[in-house]
């Protein structure tokens, strides 16, 4: 990919010096390290937005199901799984006996 854009930024001289020393210790150009950091930042931001959208869709689906009477309350779900846990513990006790 051709590199045609220039990115200028202001930062503390100490940070620049430390960054340049670390890039040099890795035997890599500082610009390459910055590009990798930028790509990683862009990827993480996209993933965060995608996850937020996924959670939003799940919450909206749950709200819609509750409004239409197809959802279950927290107490109903907890009672169901409490019974399932008790059954699994009973089976585990029988298997170890």
Image (cartoon, helix red, strand yellow):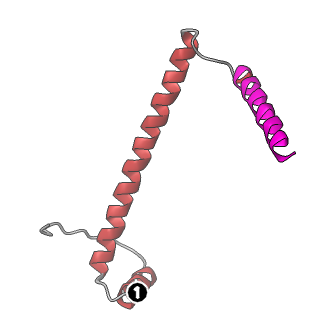
Location of residue 26 by image quarter: bottom left
Query: At 78% from the left edge and 31% from the top edge, which residue is drawn?
Result: 87
Give percent across and percent down for residue 37: 36, 68
- Residue segment shown in magenta: 76-97
Residue at which label 1 appears:
17
Q: Secondary structure at mark 1?
A: helix
Label 1 Cα crowd, 10 Å radius (few <14 / some 14-19 / many 20+): few
Say left or right for 65 vs 53. right
Location of residue 8 by image quarter: bottom left
**Magenta region includes residue 69:** no
Query: At 74% from the left edge and 22% from the top edge, which residue is drawn?
Result: 75
Compared with residue 67, is residue 49 higher up or lower down, i.e. above or below? below
Compared with residue 60, is residue 20 higher up or lower down, i.e. above or below? below
Q: Quadrant of the C terminus?
A: top right
Location of residue 33 by image quarter: bottom left
**Magenta region includes residue 81:** yes
Give percent across and percent down for residue 14: 45, 84
Q: 93 or 64, which lies in front?
A: 93
Say left or right for 34 vs 61. left
Query: At 33% from the left edge and 64% from the top edge, which residue is drawn?
Result: 38
């Amino acid at each position: 990919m051709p590199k045609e854009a220039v990115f200028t930024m202001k930062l503390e001289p100490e940070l620049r010096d430390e960054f340049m020393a670390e890039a040099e210790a890795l035997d890599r150009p500082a610009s390459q390290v910055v590009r990798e950091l930028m790509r990683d930042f862009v990827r993480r931001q996209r993933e965060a937005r995608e996850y937020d959208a996924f959670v939003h869709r799940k919450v909206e689906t749950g709200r819609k199901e509750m409004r239409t009477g197809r959802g279950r309350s927290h107490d109903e779900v907890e009672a169901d799984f409490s019974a399932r846990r008790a059954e699994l513990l009973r089976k585990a006790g029988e298997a170890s006996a």
